[in-house]
Image (cartoon, rainbow, N blue to C red):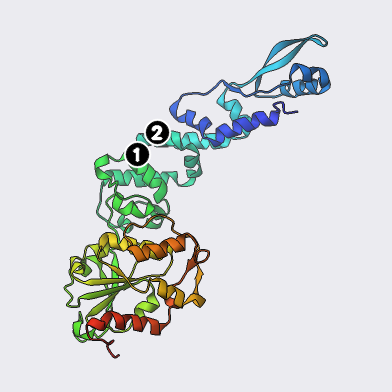
Amino acid sequence: MNWTSPRDLRAQLQRAWDRGELLAGMVSGESSFPRRLTLKGPTSVQMSEHFDAVRAWIADLSALRHYRVEMRELRHRVLGANEVPAAVWIDTLDAALDVLGKRREAGRFAALVERTRERQPLLLEWITRKPLKVLELAAVWDQLLDIVDWVKRHPRPGVYLRQVDIAGVSSKFIEAHRGVLIQCLDQVLPPGVVDTTASGVSGFVRRYGFRDKPQRIRLRVLDPSHALIPASGDADITLDAASFARLAPTASRVFITENEINFLAFPQVPDSLLIFGAGYGFEALGQATWLARCQVFYWGDIDTHGFAILDQLRSHLPHACSLLMDRATLLAFEAQWGVEDKQTLRDLPRLNAEERALYDDLRDNRLGSNLRLEQERIGFGWIEAALIALDAGRSGHLIKQ
């Protein structure tokens, strides 16, 4: 029979706990008790056909502790008048906690609420929405309040997280709890001190005005006659983004590759330099205005993510061209094809017609399932031939190393 059992009644209370409803009332003071629970009982026909089972069901409900069972008289033409449960109530939060065995958790939560009410009352609204999250963080809640206190006293502090001086709190602790700190800080800080353009845990530092680690750009000069440092040859150079933006290189051509071995093995090419790419992180390149006067070639994997990165690069450098990301290269190295774990499926508006056609074939799996050709699997002779072809209008050859 699908009549409501004691287990079903407890499950209803458990769902209310899991939704945070029982604890939320402890913050707001708005009680949801007495609380009527859903009750499904026997029909008149079932009363006749399963009278013994009905009596057992009534006895089980009547014997329950902590619940209040309302009875009603049911008259039956054969069985006469009988008292059957009409409604089941749980009258108090304490009774519900006893049923669920949650008194200890509720007591711990009440203490967290009181400390928060004393220190950061603006967080109470958030706690009402996320009571189970707060309970989950009970062991570290005081440290989290310490951080909120500190940031509120030092809005947009302009220091590294390592410089935040709070007893018992390390920068690693802050980094590990950025997700919940974002929710708490957004709740208590004035809107004017929160940079809402920086989102997610990766944007935590910028969102609240901490100093961030400088972005670094790694490059090689591919033509010694255009060396950035005298007599440096093809030195492997790393610069912070600001220093990179201030460069005034004499080379007029720039290659970007995503693979470190390709970066190191890339042949010397006249009038050129090479940048080790950073996936989807091209904001620093966009700050270097001198790149606008250079030819820019991007070499990435032939897969949906490779084309997505190319599309993203063009949002900063619209004139960038792709290199070795064409159908001929893909087909020439069929034996080296691999599988892309998770494809990008969105439209990429900055691809040209040929790139878009190949991208569509890849994302629609017309050439194979989740097909990809990683750039490091392309034969080196093919790379050299492509660079010579690019350079045909210039010197017509690569620089001998």
Find residue 83 and name its label: none
Picture coordinates of residue 278 (x, y %)?
34, 67
Image quarter where the C terminus lies is bottom left
Mark 2 element type? helix
Image quarter where the N terminus lies is top right
| Residue displayed at 23% across by 75% down | 253
Picture coordinates of residue 307 (x, y %)?
38, 64
- Vertical order, 214 against 128 (above or below): below
- Cβ–Cβ under 8 Å for marks 2 and 1: yes
| Residue beneath disc 1 | 187
**Callout 2: 10 Å neighbours few (<14), some, many (20+)?**
few
Of residues 365 and 258, the one nearer the viewer is 365
- Vertical order, 153 against 40 (above or below): below
Horizontal side of residue 383 vs 343, given as left or right: left
| Residue beneath disc 2 | 125
Horizontal side of residue 314 vs 370, given as left or right: left
Q: As shown in the figure, which amino acid type bears the numbered disc 1?
A: Gln
Q: CA distance from mark 2 to mark 1?
A: 8 Å
Of residues 394 and 237, the one nearer the viewer is 394
| Residue displayed at 25% across by 68% down | 240
